[in-house]
Image (cartoon, rainbow, N blue to C red):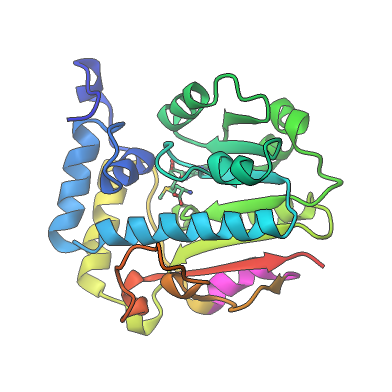
Amino acid sequence: MGNATPDASRKPATAARIYDYFLGGVHNFPADQEAARAMLTSAPAMLPIARVNRAFLRRAVSCLTEAGVRQFLDIGSGIPTAGNVHEIAQRAVPDARVVYVDIDPVAVAESLELLEGNRWATAIRADLRTPRTIVDHPQVRKLIDFSQPVALLLVGVLYFVPDDAEAYAAVAELTGACAPGSYLVVSHSTIDEKAYDPDALRSTQDVYKRQTATPLTVRTRDGIRRFFDGFELLEPGLVWQPEWRPEPTDPEHFRDEPERSRMLAAVGRLP
Ligand code: SAM
């Protein structure tokens, strides 16, 4: 499976490659496949959750492109797959700027390969927990003009920053660098009562903790809303992921029970 090489069998699992496995991608190695399968045993919903998350990302980027945003900083961007941010944005606006940021070297390498020849998009390796290394990165500065509105995408990544102080400070620092009229896009797993399946959560967290370098946390609705302090939420606000401006082409999963997506999502605008 995947593009595993003899060397790859020794690589520890990573969140990026486990997610790639859930999405049916080929850039995952035996350790990722093993970790992903261990999660699916007790939490089979991880597969549709990943797809529904990806569909939200697509809708949010289309919406922001229509709203006139021309610059996208996608942090925790993952391994390229169907419906990447630059494809959606540049389809509408060929010179839309996109910078992908991920902690995983494989995600960055695959992104750079895909972006070869694309002068308006690039990828860098950086850690969300050190936001200045992102904002001040020469490649980011080359493409992103922080005096103009930026879409800051933190989709499916803040739950990999378990320390609250670190997570809120990182988002405040990143949004503090953005001009008025910028947008923040977040999706985040929640322990909102309706979504809470303690056994599935515990075993998923256990696999991330034991088999990757990025433990997974969950936050309450209020805790997720707090990332948007200072932002005005676009309609319909902070909602279950499938409920955020659904489209007929979305995956069918969770249409009748959106809380089973276990992820809340919102888009906010900086006044
Ligand atoms: N944003 C993409 C999406 O929604 O389709 C990918 C989400 S994937 C679930 C989470 C990504 O966040 C992984 O690629 C992982 O490597 C990355 N990640 C985890 N912790 C990170 C950190 N501290 N800084 C940057 N990226 C991180």
For the C terminus, the image quarter is bottom right
Secondary structure mostly seen in magenta is helix
Residue 186, percent across and down?
A: 56, 61
Which residue is more in the foreground, 141 or 200?
A: 141
Q: Is residue 78 above or below residue 162?
A: above
Residue 81, magenta (yes or no): no
Residue 80: image quadrant is top left
Count of marks overlaid on the render: 0
Most extreme residue toward the top, as rendered?
6
In-image side of 229 versus 24 (left or right) = right
Above-or-below relation of 205 to 137: below
Q: For the magenta stretch, what is the residue range?
A: 222-231
Q: Looking at the picture, how far across and down is residue 142, in whole percent?
A: 76, 28
Give the position of the N terminus as an image quadrant: top left
Asked whether residue 158 appears in the rendered view, the answer is no
Q: Residue at x 57, y 30 (%)?
A: 123
- Placement of 157 over or under 220, stated as above or below: above
Question: For residue 172, which quarter of the picture?
Answer: bottom right
Percent position (x, y) of residue 211?
26, 42
Q: Is residue 150 left or right of residue 237?
A: right
The residue at the point 57 percent across, 69 percent down is 266
Residue shown at 63% from the left, 36% from the top: 99
